[in-house]
Amino acid sequence: MINSSVKHIIKIILAKWPLFILYLSSTTFLGFLCLLYNIKLILIADLIRFTLIPFLLFLFYRIYHEEKFLRNLRKASFQGRILEAVPHGLVEKAFINSFNQLQQQRIEYENEVQKEFKQHRDYLVMWSHEVKTPLTALSLMAENANEVASIDVQQQIALAYHQLNLILTYERLADFNHDLVFKWISVSDIIEVLIKRYAVFFIRKEITPNIKIAAVKVLTDPKWLSFILEQLLMNALKYSKKGTSIEIEWQDNAIKIVDNGIGIDASDLPRVFEPGFTGQNGRHHDSATGMGLYIAQRISKLLDLKLTIESEISNGTSAIILIPKTKIKY
């Protein structure tokens, strides 16, 4: 540590060679003038005697100041904090201001990264518990009976698949644009596939899907439009009352999924797309993660779609995906 400090000071001294050259050049020039005008050289000796010590003191001060300034700069840079130093001159003042601005941006960025990392970790922990829920249910069914009904097994597997799909999609959001393939697809075809995939939930809750989709095609990514519709359909199934119906229709250039469920409280409605927000309904449903609508909204924006939620407590919810006219073909 001492050797490195000494080497650093030597580098600073060597960097002052222009001042040494200037001082020697000045005295040499004055000596030449004295010879030229027959002035006694004793004047040059007096000049050196009276200026050498102030020059060396000034030089020592500059070396001390710069060594201290650079040492504080290294510490501030390494520790990621603001540089606290008294500037000598406009150049140092401008440098300190610029450095501190960059450090402040760095500190804010690192804090944001740490916050996102913590949120990311918390979401993954939460999802891991959600994935374990249907597996635990299957284990309990197997323990309590020699045979488990196929419909029960299918429901729990579908729930586990749904949560795993959410996790994988959340992981892809950072680099999502590389996974987009736009083409003309039939809306009714996507709806039919989703109804079949989650038919077990319709059967168990005795919910009837009423599909009123026109013969319309939209220009989008079928995989991710299907994902958005899946989240909306699962929410409708989760919060619908037993024995009711879910309307899936095409209206005013939009796909609408309307349920007759418990609805969303007016105070919760503006926040339904926030990550991790579950609201009053989520507090009464242990399986709510508050991430489905958040991810669906993120993907909707990337697909140039507008996703909105309309709801009234105890009177059901309407999820609406508005599609630009330029991306619709009848």
Image: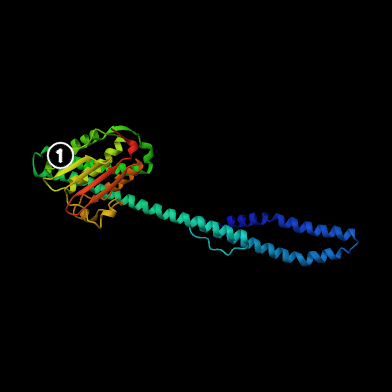
Quadrant (top left/top right/bottom left/bottom right) for the N terminus: bottom right
Q: Percent x, y for residue 57?
A: 69, 65
Q: Give the answer, above or below, for where 321 lies relative to 75.
A: above
Q: Nearer the viewer, residue 314 or 196?
A: 314
Q: Is residue 74 visible?
A: no
Instruction: Give the quadrant of residue 172.
Output: top left
Image point (28%, 50%), residue name: 125
Q: In this rendering, does residue 47 appear at all?
A: yes
Q: Amino acid at mark 1?
A: Val
Q: Quadrant of the C terminus?
A: top left
Name the secondary structure under disc 1.
helix
Q: Look at the image and name its color scheme.
A: rainbow
Disc count in the image? 1
| Side of 286 relative to 217 (left or right) | left
On screen, residue 162 versus residue 89, left or right, reads left
Q: Position of residue 237 (x, y in %)?
A: 18, 45
Q: Nearer the viewer, residue 109 or 314?
A: 314
In the rendered image, which residue does mark 1 sit on? 200
Residue 321 drawn at (x, y percent): 28, 43
Rendered view: 20 above or below 190 = below
In this orientation, which residue lies closer to the viewer: 208 or 237?
Answer: 208
Q: Residue furthest right?
A: 38
Q: Position of residue 3 (x, y in %)?
A: 59, 56
Q: Residue at x 38, y 37 (%)?
A: 178
Left or right: 96 in relation to 279 = right
